[in-house]
Amino acid sequence: MNLEIFERMRADERYRKTPVILCTAVQDRATVQRAASLAVTHYVLKPYSRALMLDKLRQIRAGLGKIDALEDSGVVCKRLGIELDMYRPMLKSLLDDITGWTAQIRAATEPGGVRTLFIRGRGIKGSCLSLGVPRIARHLNAIETALQEYLAGPSAAFPPAALAALLDELDREIELATGQTPAAV
């Protein structure tokens, strides 16, 4: 799948925030990850229904968010070849892991520790994409960029104020995702 047109849209200030619904049969991890990094509003897998598309358009029109906090669990389970009762604990474990990781970042004081957390964050981001939590993956991408900038020239204080704000936003996304998580989680 070629996402070049979306790259050009996001590079142009006029279209940077234009909502995009990507309708595709492609669901490999690399494509989903690239679409998330381009802030595709909704990633809809074919075959899709008219009702689903109307719902996504209503969400955009109502301004209910750029993308859902959680991808449909049935779609994720199908993609991963697992049952829902296996998916739920995996998702809960991932969200718990992210919460612990953010606490470690807030407690970090030296570049060596930050570097380790940076690497771990990349793995967590990949898990988010695999388990259908693209919005959190987008936040992790922004945090990754802030950590890269810090590691390129560490400042006296860690975490920098901008990173602290990103971590706070991520905490809110985790709360949203937890609220959308199936009741058994």
Image (cartoon, rainbow, N blue to C red):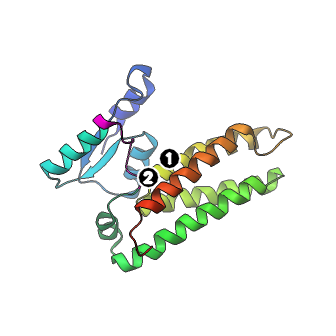
What kind of element bears circle 2? Answer: helix
In the image, which residues are magenta?
61-69
Q: Locate residue 166: give its quadrant.
A: top right
**Quadrant, the C terminus:** bottom left
Query: What residue sits 54% from the left and 47% below the top?
Result: 139
Query: What residue sits 50% from the left and 52% below the top?
Result: 136
In the rendered structure, which amino acid carries the disc numbered 1? Arg
Which residue bears the numbered disc 2? 134
Q: Locate residue 40: give its quadrant.
A: top left
Q: Circle 1: is it few (<14), some (14-19), or many (20+) Cα within 10 Å? A: many
Which of the pair 95/47 is nearer the observer?
95
The dot on residue 79 is none
Say above or below: 101 vs 77.
Answer: above
Magenta stretch: includes residue 173:
no
In the image, taking residue 7 as reference, residue 98 lies left or right, namely right
In the rendered structure, which amino acid carries the disc numbered 2? Pro
Which residue bears the numbered disc 1? 138
Which of the pair 81/165 is nearer the observer?
165
Q: Is residue 179 visible?
A: yes
Which of the pair 62/91 is nearer the observer?
62
Q: How far apart are marks 1 and 2 (CA)?
A: 6 Å
